[in-house]
Image (cartoon, helix red, strand yellow):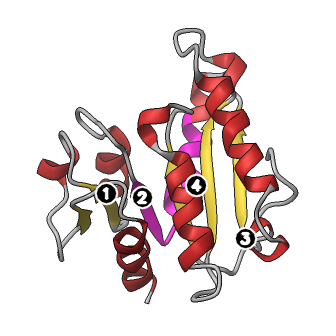
Amino acid sequence: MVTDSAPPPDVPVVLQASRWDAMKDMQGVMRGFAAHLVGASDAHLILAGPESSGVTDDPEANAVLQDCLSIWRGLPAAARGRIHLACVPMEDPDAAAAIVNALQRHAQVVVQKSLAEGFGLTVAEAMYKSRPVVGTAVGGIADQIVPGETGALIADPSDLDAFAAAVGALLK
């Protein structure tokens, strides 16, 4: 865990598990959750990505992670206590897959708020585990999520109000 602590085991969890990549919009997920869901639910948010030093073909990963940490540090204490940033160790691919699997199975809602995306592997993994997914209607995500059946699609990736409303509705 990069941030202070893990969420309590008995609270709902919203999860985005992605690479630390600007196109995955981890920053937007955090901002939307902090602004709209911290006071409206008891859910916690986990943003999980690979340990940034463990992905050699993703040169911007550390910068995106550092940006997320900077945003997190600037949040009010109540939000910081409900938002958790985690780096998954990458030395052992099987262990990394097991960690992501456990996070997805524990999550009540999985999100993939990408600004651009091909096929959303994390979307497919969450659906396989019968977890509702809130995703942006970009690329392959728009073809994967069936609104009202497997989750919700957000038309505009920058619309944090719509994002939070969709997550909030699925939490209820």
Say above or below: 156 vs 101: below
The tag earlier along the polypeptide, 4 or 2, is 4
The tag earlier along the polypeptide, 3 or 2, is 3
Which residue range is magenta in the image?
97-112
User: Can residue 142 be spotted in the picture?
Assistant: yes
Say above or below: 167 vs 32: below
Please report contact status of discs 2 and 1: CB closer than 8 Å, yes or no: yes
10 Å crowding of disc 4: few (<14), some (14-19), many (20+): many
Which residue lies under the disc numbered 3? 82
Which residue lies under the disc numbered 1? 135
How many angstroms separate mark 4 from mark 2 (CA)?
12 Å
Residue 110 inside the magenta-drawn segment: yes
Question: Which of the 4 image quadrants contains residue 118?
Answer: top left
How many angstroms separate mark 3 from mark 2 (CA)?
16 Å
Which residue lies under the disc numbered 2? 111
Query: Could you tell me which residue is drawn at 63 percent across and 58 percent down?
Result: 46
Residue 53 inside the magenta-drawn segment: no
Say above or below: 45 vs 3: below
Foreground tag (4 vs 3)? 3
Residue 56 in the image: x percent, y percent?
59, 9
- Checking the image for residue 103, the label placed there is 4
Q: From the viewer's perspective, tell me whether residue 99 is left or right of residue 89.
A: left
Q: Which image quadrant: the C terminus? A: bottom left
How many angstroms separate mark 2 from mark 1 (CA)?
6 Å
10 Å crowding of disc 1: few (<14), some (14-19), many (20+): many
Q: Secondary structure at mark 3?
A: loop
Residue 13 in the image: x percent, y percent?
58, 70
